């Protein structure tokens, strides 16, 4: 079956190559340099909605796009033309097109248009407007020009791309046949612009930081490693922008951010892609409570701009992003879900035994009560946090860059924002004490040497910067891809990354 399909595709390609050659010999392409459009299809549909059935409007228009469908009926034909904004019907009448061709006003006859132009080809047309008796606004074509000949067929218009993985591997086909996919990436672009505009309007400066770094830091993650040949130097793709943005705060910039790509050499899932986008924001003289307010305002404002409201639907569930959002400590949430009060556990073995009694897994790598608390949270609480919830006050062991809590020993001033069971943002009152920071990074380095490949290393230059002096600072990171998933009702991160990383395709 597969061979017969490949054979048919090969024959179709040969046929289209022959048509391309015929068009070339006629002096009509098949690959044009440019075309001047006067309108988009959406503008035509909106501006001429009042045109009555069976009437023409003697307004000359030029539009360009891809031919999506064809119906040829003797001396009359109907094509559907799609551009980025929508579609419009082309009303092709033999007498009109041939009259223009005979006057050398056009580059092709009706027969050439209906026999040499296929679905998938890009064409430009000029004509007047007509609404058919069935009510379809159309361009009554007088002149046409081939702009680019398609040698491959489009996916079936009724079934689209049934193979989900093929949608990701051949995103260009997905975008052609799926208006929903195009809308997702349009919303993504608008959302990114809205985030930048919101921050810019509040005096935050976007400053770019290095992608190639001598020491990967700012997150617990395994980095990608590369090598600079001239310097004979191992380098890492950044796993966060945090440490360099903090250096900028040390240097005197009081409000900075960067929205850009991050790289982590980790697994892939509906929530994770090794290459993803985040925005990190740092504000001097602020703490994690200020960052909560900023997060609420930023996300709710952008949601209103992109979705029209702070009430949206995600996978059939209504989500209300209207501030203020729920705030609860990790201890409180774990106790609500499991009955376990981790504030009362002083011994690792006792905490582990209590977790096992309520059916929670006790990983061997969880070597402290704080790490067990985090495990209990991830297993018993995380997926249940559907409405926006700030989870506060994390164990110090898992937060090496956050400031110690002002009133709760063993905890730090950190929150993560969860929406629809997913971490969407992470923020701290930043650790600015260089001696405390050194101790914590050295503890992380020891874990790395013991085999934890995601543990931090010691970045001596960053520690040197802290010793120069960093003001009190609040820091925030938001996962752009997960926010796009929420705003576009997309179940997988691969739906919102134009070209996600995939396993190599098996050759048959």
Image (cartoon, grey):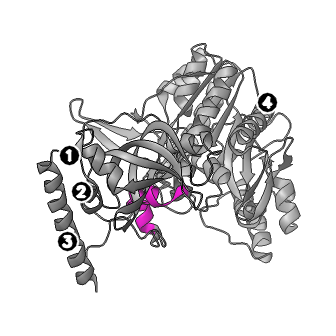
User: Can you identify the residue that label 2 sits on?
Assistant: 112
- The answer to whether residue 452 is seen in the rendering is yes
Q: Are marks 3 and 2 in contact (CB under 8 Å)?
A: no
Q: Earlier in the sequence, mark 3 or mark 2?
A: 3
- Mark 4 — residue? 290
Which quadrant is the N terminus positioned in?
bottom left
The CA span between labels 3 and 2 is 23 Å
Which range is magenta?
165-179
Magenta residue check for 177 = yes
The residue that mark 1 highlights is 28
Q: Nearer the viewer, mark 2 or mark 4?
A: 2
Distance (Cα) linking label 4 and label 3: 62 Å
Instruction: Please give the name of the residue rendered at 61% of the width and 13% of the height, measured from the top-left corner.
Output: 252
Residue 245 location in percent, x, y? 56, 26
Q: Are marks 1 and 4 in contact (CB under 8 Å)?
A: no
Tell whether label 1 touches label 2 (CB within 8 Å): yes
Of callouts 2 and 4, the N-terminal one? 2
Decide which of 480, 82 is in the foreground and name it: 82
């Amino acid at each position: 079956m597969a061979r017969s399909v490949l054979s048919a595709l090969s024959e179709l390609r040969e046929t289209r190559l022959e048509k391309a050659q015929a068009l070339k010999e006629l002096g009509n392409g098949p690959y044009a340099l440019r075309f001047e459009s006067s309108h988009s299809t959406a503008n035509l549909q909106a501006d001429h909605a009042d045109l009555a059935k069976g009437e023409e409007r003697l307004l000359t228009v030029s539009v360009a796009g891809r031919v999506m469908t064809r119906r040829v009926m003797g001396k009359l034909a109907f094509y559907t033309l799609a551009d980025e904004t929508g579609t419009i019907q082309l009303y092709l009448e033999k007498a009109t097109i041939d009259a223009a061709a005979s006057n050398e006003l056009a580059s092709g006859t009706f027969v050439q248009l209906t026999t040499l132009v296929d679905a998938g080809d890009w064409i430009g047309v000029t004509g007047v407007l007509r609404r058919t008796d069935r009510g379809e606004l159309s361009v009554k074509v007088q002149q046409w020009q081939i702009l680019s000949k398609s040698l491959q067929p489009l996916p079936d218009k009724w079934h689209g791309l049934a193979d989900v993985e093929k949608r990701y591997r051949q995103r260009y086909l997905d975008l052609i046949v799926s208006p929903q996919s195009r809308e997702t990436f349009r919303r993504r672009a608008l959302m990114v612009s809205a985030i930048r505009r919101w921050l810019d309007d509040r005096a935050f400066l976007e400053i770019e930081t290095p992608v190639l770094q001598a020491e990967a830091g700012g997150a617990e993650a395994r980095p990608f490693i590369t090598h600079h040949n001239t310097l004979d130097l191992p380098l890492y793709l950044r796993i966060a922008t945090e440490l360099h943005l903090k250096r900028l705060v040390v240097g005197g910039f009081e409000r900075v951010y960067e929205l850009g790509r991050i790289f982590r050499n980790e697994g892939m899932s509906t929530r994770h892609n090794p290459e993803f986008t985040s925005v990190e924001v740092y504000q001097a003289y602020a703490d994690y409570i200020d960052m909560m307010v900023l997060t609420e305002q930023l996300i709710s404002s952008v949601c209103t701009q992109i979705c029209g409201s702070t009430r949206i639907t995600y996978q059939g569930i209504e989500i209300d992003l209207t501030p203020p959002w729920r705030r609860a400590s990790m201890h409180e949430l774990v106790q609500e879900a499991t009955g376990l009060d981790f504030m009362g556990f002083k011994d690792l073995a006792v905490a582990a035994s209590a977790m096992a009694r309520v059916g929670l897994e006790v990983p061997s790598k969880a070597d402290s009560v704080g790490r067990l608390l985090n495990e209990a949270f991830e297993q018993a609480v995380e997926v249940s946090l559907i409405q926006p919830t700030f989870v506060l006050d994390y164990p110090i062991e898992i937060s090496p860059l956050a400031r110690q809590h002002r009133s709760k020993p063993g905890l730090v001033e950190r929150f993560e924002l969860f929406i629809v069971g997913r971490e969407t943002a992470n923020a701290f009152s930043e650790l600015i004490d260089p001696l405390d920071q050194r101790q914590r990074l050295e503890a992380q380095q020891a874990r790395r040497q013991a085999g934890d490949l995601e543990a931090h290393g010691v970045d001596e230059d960053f520690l040197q910067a802290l010793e120069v002096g960093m003001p009190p600072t609040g820091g925030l990171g938001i996962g752009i891809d997960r926010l796009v998933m929420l705003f576009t009702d997309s179940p997988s991160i691969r739906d919102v990354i134009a070209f996600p990383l995939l396993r190599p395709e098996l050759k048959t």
